[in-house]
Amino acid sequence: MKRLHQRNRHAFTLIELIVVISVISVLMGLLYGALERAKKFSRRAIAFSELKAIENAFIQFRAHYHTWPIGDTVEATSTESTESAADTTTTIAEKPIDSVDNKDHGFVIDRRIANLLQGLALDVSKTDKRNFNYEGIPFIEFSRYSVYAPYPPINPFKSNTAGDDTARCYYVLFDTNGDHQIHIPALEPGDIATNIIADVAVWTYIPGTRSGRGSNTGETTQTASVNDERLESWSGFNVK
């Protein structure tokens, strides 16, 4: 009888078990939040380092060739020559972008530009190689990107829109008019057009925070929206 009493004294009660499980759940929740913040910080750091690497690659490109990668491909990268660009079968950029004054030109880095910038001739035409990097000099190495991948180099974040990886690409604008200023256009919702003092600008979009809490105004219901954040090479690395 005495042995049975001593053995029962060491058993957990139901309340004690519930308390222990609750404490473990709280600790797991805190740990999960910390891990998510660490993953976001890591992805942000990777994306920013790739922005600076692309920026430095184009600076080295200009130092070697004494021009930005526009030259004979201006028709493919400038909306000033949209008619002739439409007739061009081989273009450097599938998605050309321009500043608002139509003087500074650039593009979205696609697979061909990524390969040419790495000094590779895979899946590029002779015209592209002649106009872009005819010496085949490797100005950069995209460590996370495979040359055989069916998509261009993209940042490590997941897009807010499922299945849409185009917003995760890298955008580039050059100071082609020589005034040492670049006008950054607003390409995505929530973007703010801005002028910067630089010779080359590189940016990408990463998932931002949810803006707005949703409200009912009469018969109209306003829901919260998610805007992407523009991560910029010309700004410092911010921890968010």
Image (tube, grey):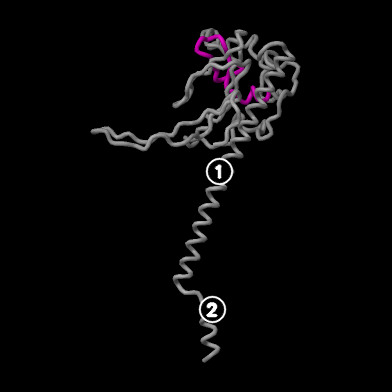
User: What residue appears at the point 64 percent right and 30 percent down from the top-left corner?
Assistant: 50
Gap between marks 2 and 1, in whole Å? 40 Å
* Residue 116 vertical position relative to residue 215 in the rendered view, above or below: above
- Where is residue 14, by image quadrant? bottom left
Q: Earlier in the sequence, mark 2 or mark 1?
A: 2
* Residue 105 vertical position relative to residue 205 in the rendered view, above or below: above
Q: In the displayed structure, does residue 135 sit left or right of residue 80? A: right
* Residue 29 vertical position relative to residue 141 in the rendered view, above or below: below
Amino acid on which the number 1 mark rests in the picture = Arg
Mark 2 residue element: loop
* Residue 110 vertical position relative to residue 32 in the rendered view, above or below: above
Q: Which residue is mark 1?
A: 37
Question: How many numbered marks does the figure carry?
Answer: 2
Camera-side mark, 2 or 1: 2
Q: Quadrant of the C terminus?
A: top right
User: What residue appears at the point 53 percent right and 8 percent down from the top-left corner?
Assistant: 80
Mark 1 residue element: helix
